[in-house]
Structures are given as structure tokens and as C-alpha cells.
Image (cartoon, rainbow, N blue to C red):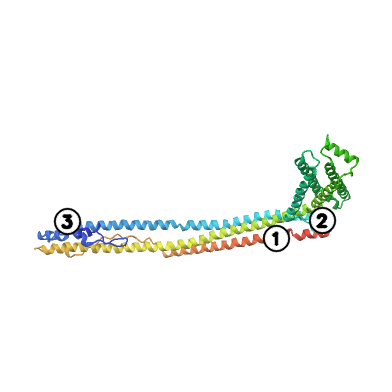
Amino acid sequence: MDLFNEPIHPYRPATEIFLDLNVSRVADTLKLTQRGRERGAQNRPPADAQTFDDVEHQILERIDSHKQDAHSLYLDHSHTYDQRLAALNFEQRFATIQQAAPEAVGDFRAEAALGRDELFGLRRQVWDSERERDHFRARHKIARPARLSTTGKTVFKIGVLAVMFVIEVAMNGGFLSKSNAGGLLGGAIQATSFAALNIVASFLFGLVPIRLINRRQIFLKLLGFLSLLAYLAFAVALNLTLSHLRDMPPTVSGDIGHEVLVRLSQRPLGLEDVNSWVFFSIGFIFSLIAMADGLLFTDPYFGYAALERRCIDARDQYTDGKAALIENLREIRDTASQAMNDAAHDLSVRRGEYDAILQNRARLSQRFTEHQNQIERSARALLSIYREANQSARTQPPPKYFAQPYNLDRIIYASNEPSQAIREALAKSIEETQKLLSGQIQAVHDVFNKAVDSYREIDDLIPETMSGTSSGKGA
């Protein structure tokens, strides 16, 4: 059981970096008691011996081997601490921060200047659009704002046209099928064609040419009036054509279209069925509604709504661009501030790690020194075990050096710890760099505020009241 419980190494179990020798284990391994008695019985070493014997040399070799192992372990740990100190690289970190922080502020100023130039162009477009609109209002003596169709109104008006188109197709198909040789299908085809022409053409008449009647120029007003007469003639002619087409019996041979034209030219109002007049009235009313829908689809004064829409689009583009530029600057500011705060925090962390490394390295040196003292005590204990066993078996006096304590040749390193002045200089450099970062963070915030103020100054350089004043003077 003792054999099973023996450790595989001659050290005492511990959690320290340097492990102490197990004196009893080494003594048992070297058989110091047995060999001491054997050599003592032979009075070896002789009484006049001046140097250690073979057994004592073996003990010292074991001690020296343990000391060299501890020394290698000390060098490995010390090298690791030196590498960690070198990895902190404060000088390079200081140089990077001192160069990058002002560059970040300069880049932020450049970004703000580019945004100001872009925003100035957008604000100029707004002013040009508003000036064009106000000159238009002054020239045409318009004092009211433009009536623009919203999305809901546009959908409603288009829906009205679609409903009328469907109703007219269904109604025309039922009427025309009576006079069409193709029956219901032929009547539906004719109804779709005539309904599309009646609704779409009437809508376009009201949307473009008839709206010219609201213009101030005599020529355009006359053109709009003539367009209204042309529309009325078109609507009456188209719906009379449909009514005469319905009156045509399906037994009529030859070209039905030619026959309808003949009847229109000879007696246009000669409809033979009252339903044909109803058919004409409904179609003409639908045409009037489509024309009115086109006339009121946008502002009745031709060209005014387009100018107002351009002003609104330019204003929206300017507002959105301004918000996007400010948001972009805010993101850059926050990113730069976060980076500088992280750099300042990193310096504090590095400073703490630097102090911890120095403390641990000093503690390592102290432990190595203490461990060499323990090695010396272990050597004296091993020599004492051997010499006591040797003296107990001797018949002659022991050598005089048996009474002299053993002194270990210690490994001593000159302290390479940084001086207090160096540590104070490092702390001062860290403090100055952190102050630089704090100043640059404040500089970034100042540049951001100035950039936002400069964006607002663009409204003062090209104010909205400028266009309003010109408009009032023109009116």
C-alpha cells in the first residue's frame, strides 16, 4: 500500500509555482541512512577529509538539479511577463491616438462641409421652384393655392370612370345586341369600343384642352372654348351614332356603318324608338360626367398644379435630404465618440494590466528567492540525515566540515523593474492622452452642432419668405 501511495515525483504536493523537495522521499531514494551507516562503519570519509564524499556529492547534484529546474521555470514565467509588457506597447498606442483623434475631427468637418454644399443645392432648387410658381401666380393674377389631388381623390375619380365604363358597356351591350347580327357577343364588342371612346375621350377633353378656358390669355381662353364646343359636338355625334346603330334592324343587308352615316347626314334626329333617345341621353350624361371628372382631376387652371407639385417635391427632397445629412452626421459623431471612449477605456485597462504584471513579476522574483532558501534548507536536511547516520556508526571522529552548515550558491538577478520616475511618466502620458481624447470628443460634438447650425443658416441665406414676398409683390 505504501508503494501505491508513493507520488511519481520527489516534490511535495502544492499549488505554488515552485514546488518544495520532499526531503524524506529523496532520502529514501538515495538510501542516505543506510549508506551513511555503512560508510560510518568504515570511518569514511576520514577524519582529516576536507571535501565532500561521493554520497554528499550525489545529494548536492540532486539539489543543484532541482535548483536549475526552478531557475528554468522562473525564466519561463519571467519571459511571459516580459512578452505581456511588450504587448501593451503604450508608445505605439499613444502615437496612434494622437494621430487618429484629430484626423477623425477633420474628417467630420469635411463630411459636414460636403453635406452643406449638397443641402445648399437642394435649398436652391426649392427657392427656384417657389420663385417660378410665384411668378406664375403673379403673371396670371392667382391669389389662391393650387388644388392638388390627393391619392384618395385620384383613386375615387378613377373609380368613378371605371364604374361608368362598366355600366355603359353592360347597358350598350344589351341595347346593341338587338340590332347586331352577332347577337349578344357582337353587341358587347361594339359596346366596349364605343364606351371606351365615350369615357376616355371625354375625360381627356376635360383634362387638357377644355381647361384652357380658365387661362388669362385670350388666345388660350378662345382655344379652350372652341375645345368645349368640339367636345359637345363629339359627344352628341358619338351618342347619336350609337342610337342610330341601335335603330338599325339586324335584317339590314350591306354595310351597316355606311347606313348609319347616311341616316346621320340625312336626318340625325330621326330616331324611331324612344329607347334610342334614352340610350342617347344616358351615354351623353356619362360623357359629361367623364369630361367633368377630367376637368376637376387637378387644379382647373392649366399648368398651375404642375408648378405647385414641383415646389412640393423640391421641398420634400430638401427636408428629407436635410434629415438624412443630419442623421448621417449623428451616426458619424456617435461612432467617433464611441471609438474615442473605447480608446480611453483601453488605456485605463492597459494601465491596470501594466501594474498587475509588474506586481506579479516582482512577486515571482520574491518567490524564487524564497524557494532558493527552501532548497538550501532541504540540502542541509539531506546532508544532516546522511551525516548523523554516518556519525552514529563511526569509531573515529567525523571530519570537521560535518559541523559546518551548507550554503547554497544562489542565483541572483539585478532588478529590472521600472523606476518610480518611469511609472510616473507613463501615468502622466496616459492622463494627457485621455484628456486629448476627451477634448476631441467635445470637438466632434462642437463640429456637429456647428454643422447643424450651418444647415439651418442655409434657410436664412435662401429664406422661404423671400419667395412669399416676391409673390405678394407680383400679385
**Would residue 400 be seen by someone viewing this image from the given angle?**
no
Structural crowding at the residue carrying mark 3, measured as other residues with C-alpha within 10 Å and reported as few (<14), some (14–19) or many (≥20): few
- Ranked by sequence position, the earlier of labels 3 and 1 is 3
Which numbered disc, 3 or 1, marks the residue closer to the eye? 1
SS class of the residue under badge 1? helix
Residue 279: image x %, image y %?
A: 83, 47
Residue that sits furthest to the front in the current view:
251
Q: Which residue is mark 3?
A: 54
Residue type, label 2: Arg
Which numbered disc, 1 or 2, marks the residue closer to the eye? 2
Residue that sits furthest to the top in the current view:
254
For residue 467, which quarter of the picture?
bottom right
Structural crowding at the residue carrying mark 1, measured as other residues with C-alpha within 10 Å and reported as few (<14), some (14–19) or many (≥20): some
For residue 82, which quarter of the picture?
bottom left
- Measure the C-alpha gap from mark 1 to mark 2: 28 Å
- Toward the viewer: 7 or 28? 7
- Toward the viewer: 470 or 278? 278
Residue type, label 1: Glu
- Toward the viewer: 443 or 137? 137
Q: Which residue is mark 1?
A: 457
- Measure the C-alpha gap from mark 2 to mark 3: 122 Å
Query: Which mark is on residue 259?
Result: none
**Would residue 329 be seen by someone viewing this image from the given angle?**
yes
Q: Which residue is mark 2?
A: 137
Residue 390: image x %, image y %?
A: 13, 62
Quadrant position of the N terminus in the picture = bottom left
SS class of the residue under badge 3? helix
- Ranked by sequence position, the earlier of labels 1 and 2 is 2
Residue type, label 3: Asp
